[in-house]
Image (tube, coloured by chain):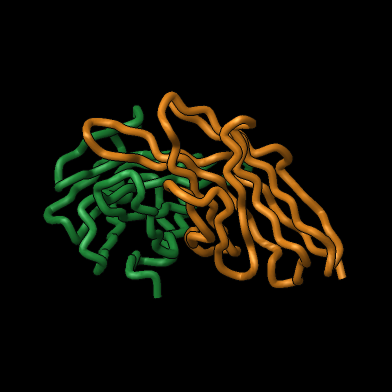
Chain colours: A green, B orange
């Protein structure tokens, strides 16, 4: 149990579907992140929320839409995805200082068909 | 800007042999450095971290890493590999962005352990 829970663990969706990934942390952290991990590629930072405000968005396509309603919850809303968006999506949280390591959820394995 | 380079996308060792995974960093300020491990279909788990103080850092599962400022390195070692150590290992450094400190990861090194 890492303290960061992601649901669902696996998701298969068509290119015209709309779905959402959920992340919840019970660690009292004030920063949360979405990463994309594709085969043969490095971890890609997608979004960062600190104190519930978005502080970084690394040029992610608009078909990915994050939402952070409070410091414990983070969502990634998906719509009209492409097959190349198939990947492991990882959520992480940390405390708002340099020494705070990131705690990761187990990820959502997304397959776009 | 800060960055991390992991030398070698794959490292293969025999069970019982020394494990050495290399990480070099680039940072304009004193870095905070981390090593994470990822098992198949799992998230990343912290192995160890260096913030300040002692440059030799001990982590879980018998791993340790030494911060060498003169070499801008933070290599991960373990004296004797076990089959259960087979996994993906990531080196990371934090960088500042908009008042927050965001981890930047290397490309990862896959550790293969042979019987």
Which residue is depicted at the point 51% across and 58% down? B48
Q: Outermost residue, front direction? A: B53
- Residue B111 showing in the rendered view: yes
Q: Image check: A91 left or right of B17? A: left
**Quarter residue A61 falls in:** top left
Task: From the top left corner, tell me how far across and down residue B21 is, in percent.
Answer: 70, 48
Q: Does residue B16 lie above or below B89 as drawn? A: below
Task: From the top left corner, tell me how far across and down residue A49 is, in percent.
Answer: 23, 44
Task: From the top left corner, tell me how far across and down residue B85 is, in percent.
Answer: 69, 66
Q: Nearer the viewer, residue A87 or B18?
A: B18
Callout count: 0
Which residue is depicted at the point 41% across and 42% down? B103
Which residue is depicted at the point 50% across and 30% down? B3
Q: Image check: A1 left or right of B47? A: left
Q: Image check: A84 left or right of A28? A: right
Q: Image check: A41 left or right of A24? A: right
**Quarter residue B99 falls in:** top left
Say which quadrant the N terminus of chain B sits in. top left
Which residue is depicted at the point 37% across and 34% down? B95
Say which quadrant the C terminus of chain B sits in. bottom right
Q: Nearer the viewer, residue B4 or A108?
A: B4
Task: From the top left corner, tell me how far across and down residue B18 is, in percent.
Answer: 80, 59
Q: Nearer the viewer, residue A51 or B39?
A: A51
**Quarter residue A42 falls in:** top right
- Residue A83 showing in the rendered view: no
């Amino acid at each position: 149990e890492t303290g960061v829970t992601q649901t669902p663990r696996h998701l298969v969706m068509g290119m015209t579907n709309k779905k959402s990934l959920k992340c919840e942390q019970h660690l009292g952290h004030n920063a949360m992140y979405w990463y994309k991990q594709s085969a043969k590629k490095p971890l890609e930072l997608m979004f960062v929320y600190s104190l519930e405000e978005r502080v970084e968005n690394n040029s992610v396509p608009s078909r990915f839409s994050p939402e952070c309603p409070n410091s414990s919850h983070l969502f990634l809303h998906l719509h009209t995805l492409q097959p190349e968006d198939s990947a492991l999506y990882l959520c992480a949280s940390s405390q708002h200082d340099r020494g705070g390591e990131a705690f990761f959820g187990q990820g959502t394995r997304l397959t776009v068909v | 800007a800060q960055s991390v380079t992991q030398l070698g996308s794959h490292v293969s060792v025999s069970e019982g042999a020394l494990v050495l995974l290399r990480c070099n960093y680039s940072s304009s300020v004193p870095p905070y450095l981390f090593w994470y491990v990822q098992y198949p279909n799992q998230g990343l788990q912290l192995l160890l971290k260096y913030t300040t103080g002692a440059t030799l850092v001990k982590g879980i599962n018998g791993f340790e890493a030494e911060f060498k400022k003169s070499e801008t390195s933070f290599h991960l070692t373990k004296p004797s590999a076990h089959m259960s150590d087979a996994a993906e290992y990531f080196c990371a450094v934090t960088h500042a962005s908009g008042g927050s400190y965001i981890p930047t990861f290397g490309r990862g090194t896959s550790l293969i352990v042979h019987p």
